[in-house]
Each structure stands twice: as C-alpha cells, then as structure tokens.
Image (tube, rainbow, N blue to C red):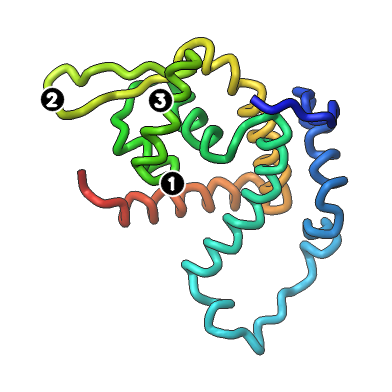
Amino acid sequence: MRQWRHALLWTNDPAVVCSARRAAFGAATRPPDRMNQPIDTADDDFVDNYTPALLAQASQLISGEFHVIVQANGFTISDWRVLSTLSGGKPISIGELAQVSVTKQPTVTRLLDRMEAQGYVKRIPHETDRRITLVRITPRGQKLTSTLIAQARAHEDHVLAPLGKKKADELRATLKLLIHLHRPAN
C-alpha cells in the first residue's frame, strides 16, 4: 500500500475527517444556508430531470469526495470497493462481488489474486456447486478496512445531514428498491 504524507487523514475522528474533506473540496459542497433556497428548474434540460443522469451525477460527486480519503489511506478505489463489499463477513461469489462492487469480473479476479497473497481475503469452494468460488474477508483484511469504514460512515452522515433522518432513510430505501428491481437475476 502507498503511504500518504497528509497525516490528518489517518485519524478515526469523524470531525477531523469531515474537516479534511471540507478543506479539500471547499465550495464543492452546498453550504447549509443554500439548503433552504429553492432550486430553479424552469430552464432544465433533459438530463436535469432524467433520473439515471441525476443518480450518476450524485454518485460521482459524493463518491469523488470520499475517494480522496480512500486514496489518502493507500487504497485504490477498486481495492476499497472489493474489501468494503466483503466487510460484512459473509462469503459471496466472485460474480456477486463484481456486481455489488461495480467492478468488472476479470478485474475482481486480479484484485483477489493480489489480496489473497497479502492475506486480506480467502477463496473458499462452494459447498454444493463446484463451479462457484466464494470469497470472504480475513481478520487481517477486516482490520485493514475498519478505520476506512468508520470514515465512510462519517462522510455519509455529513452528506445526508442536510436531508434529516427521515428523508435520508427514505432515500436509502428508495435506492435499495431501485437496485432490487433492476438487478439481473442470477
């Protein structure tokens, strides 16, 4: 893993993490006083109201903020996506891991080769289907990602705070429903 010179980002303190993010992005985040201002939609173009475009823009902006922290901690974005997907501890198939981590399966296989050699993940055979290989995170991999997961949660809290708990919960539920409705059947 790469070392990062900015010691501020090695902290577990959510306030420091959010402060570092604000310092890095400054005006890129909407100030709280702008939250109560109406958004003018009179001259919106097609993409301004097209849900997939809005989801992509929101994902790019919010993920981009956190990816700075991921990279500052020595991870590639693909490493983070794979390890955070596995962080729940239950074994999943390589295909499902690729799907959930939004990473191409050949890339996931290469990452797993390296991560398994480093002791962060372990491949295990499926109990009933020899064609399927499962992957689980090891305690070493879990330890490696735990600090970054805390920082991810702090970032998410900061991003969703202007919405309030009810709207944030509704947003999560709606996104989960959309994913469920559009995920290909296995």
Work out whether residue 86 or residue 132 is closer to the camera in this orientation and state it. 132
In the rendered image, which quarter is residue 143 located in? top right
Task: Say which amino acid is labelled 1.
Answer: Val
Give the distance between the C-alpha atoms of the residues marked 2 and 3, in whole angstroms: 21 Å
- Which residue is situated farthest in the top direction here? 139
Which residue was labeled with disc 3? 113
Quick check: 125 above or below 131? above
Which residue is pictured at 22% across the width and 18% down the height?
125
Could you say whether the residue bearing mark 1 is in a helix, strand or loop? Answer: loop
N-term mark: 1 or 2: 1
Position of the N terminus, as image quadrant, is top right
Give the distance between the C-alpha atoms of the residues marked 1 and 2, in whole angstroms: 24 Å
Q: Position of residue 55 (x, y in %)?
A: 53, 62
Which residue is pictured at 49% across the width and 75% down the height?
50
Decide: marks 1, 2 in contact (CB < 8 A)? no
Work out whether residue 5 or residue 147 is closer to the camera in this orientation and state it. 5
Which residue was labeled with disc 2? 129
Give the distance between the C-alpha atoms of the residues marked 3 and 1, in whole angstroms: 18 Å
Which residue is pictured at 79% across the width and 70% down the height?
37
Could you say whether the residue bearing mark 2 is in a helix, strand or loop? Answer: loop
N-term mark: 3 or 1: 1
Q: Position of residue 171 (x, y in %)?
A: 53, 53
Quick check: 145 above or below 36? above
Crowding around mark 1 (Cα neighbors within 10 Å: few <14, some 14 to 19, many 20+) is few
Q: Nearer the viewer, mark 2 or mark 3?
A: 3
- In the rendered picture of this protein, how many numbered marks are placed on residues? 3
Which labelled disc corresponds to residue 5?
A: none
Q: Position of residue 44 (x, y in %)?
A: 62, 84
Crowding around mark 3 (Cα neighbors within 10 Å: few <14, some 14 to 19, many 20+) is some
Could you say whether the residue bearing mark 3 is in a helix, strand or loop? Answer: helix
Which residue was labeled with disc 1? 102
Task: Say which amino acid is labelled 2.
Answer: Asp
